[in-house]
Image: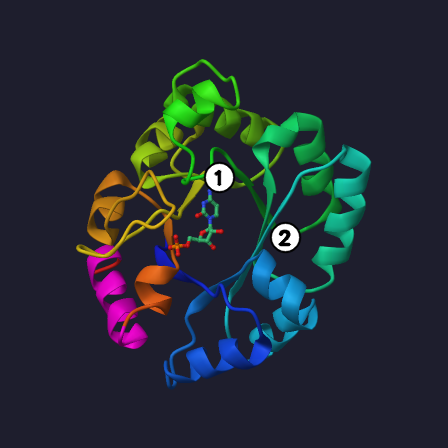
Amino acid sequence: MAKDVIIACDFSSEEETFRFLEGFRDERPYVKIGMELFYAAGPDMVRKLKKRGHQVFLDLKLHDIPNTVRKAMKVLDELGADMCNVHAAGARAMMAAASEATGGLVIGVTQLTSTSEEVMHEEILIDRPLKETVIQYALNCKDAGLKGVVCSPLEAKEVHRACGDGFLTVTPGIRLQGDARGDQKRVTTPAMARELGSDYIVVGRSITAAENPLTAYERCKREFIR
Ligand code: C5P
């Protein structure tokens, strides 16, 4: 399975994003467009990044009734992103609707890496262990025809055990040694994510907020891909 580092381009404009990417010279890293950039710059941002030679993960985390998600996914399918996602909490029928609506790669978000087990128990009133919910969500994703999940590297091994090695684990919650966790709770280094079997790591602030983003990106690649 090809491993790669995906940079979370959490910027508020097209200009800022391209200025950031120019720092990578001839490299065309795999990038992630999340809600901030998509809402600010619009759908054309996906086409522009594709045209510039990037692979694009469109991280909009759809979560609505199946009919709405099916129709939204059909619209997103036209943009040509390499990977899209939905919230696994939307359950199987919603995920199946998403997967039927596109020929592209759709994955499901299990538990956000900013959610701790304590919050899951006390605020969302899910009283099962966090890992158990991640595995159940992953199995639901697989049943619904999705090709993988977003989870923490800390859960990647169990997800592969339950759903097979070909089932993708795309893992945010990554920090280079010494970087601030910020709002993330379930974090690991790129080296640890590799050891735990993640297929892709999604790295935002450890690269975007680094003094030298290119150096930080290369360090992530060295640790994760080797
Ligand atoms: O800056 P940082 O590395 O924490 O960014 C992580 C990125 O991954 C953010 O864009 C966030 O929206 C996204 N993400 C996440 N946890 C998930 C799904 C996506 O952190 N479960």
Q: Nearer the viewer, residue 43 or 177?
A: 177
- Can see residue 162? no
- Identified at 41% across, 70% down, the residue is 29
Q: Picture coordinates of residue 126 (x, y %)?
A: 50, 17
Residue under the point 27% across and 46% down: 193
Q: Nearer the viewer, mark 2 or mark 1?
A: 1
- CA gap between label 2 and label 1 equals 14 Å
Q: Residue at x 73, y 49 (%)?
A: 73
The quarter of the picture where the C terminus appears is bottom left
Q: Is residue 80 above or below residue 104?
A: below
Residue stretch rendered in magenta on the structure: 211-224
Looking at the image, residue 159 lies above or below residue 99? above
Q: Residues within 10 Å of mark 1 (few under 14, many from 20)?
A: many
Q: Look at label 2 and name its amino acid.
A: Gly
Q: Tell me if residue 205 comes above or below residue 74 in the rendering.
A: below
Q: Is residue 81 left or right of residue 132?
A: right
Which amino acid lies under the numbered mark 1 shown in the image of this protein? Val
According to the picture, the residue beneath numbered tag 2 turns out to be 104
Q: Is residue 3 left or right of residue 48?
A: left
Q: In this figure, which residue is indicated by the disc labeled 1?
A: 149
